[in-house]
Amino acid sequence: MTTTAPVADSRTIGLAHYAARAVLESVLSRYDITFQQNNALRLAALADGPVARDELADGLTDSLKIGTAEAHRVVDELVARGLLAADGPSRVRVTASGREVYDAYSAEVKEVSARIWAGLSMEDRAAAGRVLAQVTERAEAELAALR
């Protein structure tokens, strides 16, 4: 009996996304961090210094396709928890606590990700990356046209 690999389409991409996201959210839940908070904290933690609140919110709206008000709420939640701190009237920076939490859950996610991606050739990963980049570009163009 031979099994054929499924053809990539919106359903198979969605299934992979939701499976990977469920793994990530399982790790994040141990740190009381939401998926959206993780994205904001990562952007702040990887920045070279303080980040403009609007820039952080724009990064969230662009990557997560959420509204501006919701993105600002996520940033405010991280400030309220002490994982981000105000740096002047319009900037935020990751705090020592935020860095500690980010580094801890990132290390766990890195280990899980290594297991998920193990055994997949770089050639296959590169092909999948090219296809997904093109699908993302086309979907974003359709989304822009719908707005």
Image (cartoon, rainbow, N blue to C red):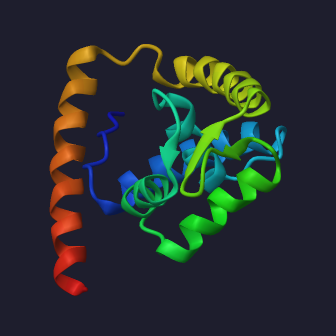
Residue 74 lies, in percent from the top left, at 64, 61
> Which residue is most to the bottom?
147
Pick the quarter of the image with the N terminus.
Answer: top left
How many numbered markers are drawn?
0
| Closest to the observer, 69 or 4 | 69
Instruction: Decide: is 121 above or below 42.
Output: above
Relative side of 100 to 124, left or right: right
* Residue at 80% from the left image edge and 55% from the top image edge: 80
Residue 65's x, y, as percent?
42, 67
Q: Nearer the viewer, residue 95 or 130?
A: 95
List the single residue furthest toward the front.
88
Image point 48% across, 70% down: which residue?
66
Question: As drawn, is 124 to the left or to the right of 13?
Answer: left
* Nearer to the camera, 59 or 6: 59
> Going 17% across and 56% down the picture, which residue do you hit?
137
| Residue positioned 70% across, 44% down in the render | 85
- Identify which residue, 26 or 117, lies in the foreground: 26
Q: Position of residue 39 (x, y in %)?
A: 55, 46
The quarter of the rendered structure image containing the C terminus is bottom left
Residue 101 position by quadrant: top right
Task: Indicate whether 116 appears above or below 6.
Answer: above
Horizontal side of residue 31 vs 137, given as left or right: right
Q: Relative to residue 10, is residue 92 depicted above or below?
A: above
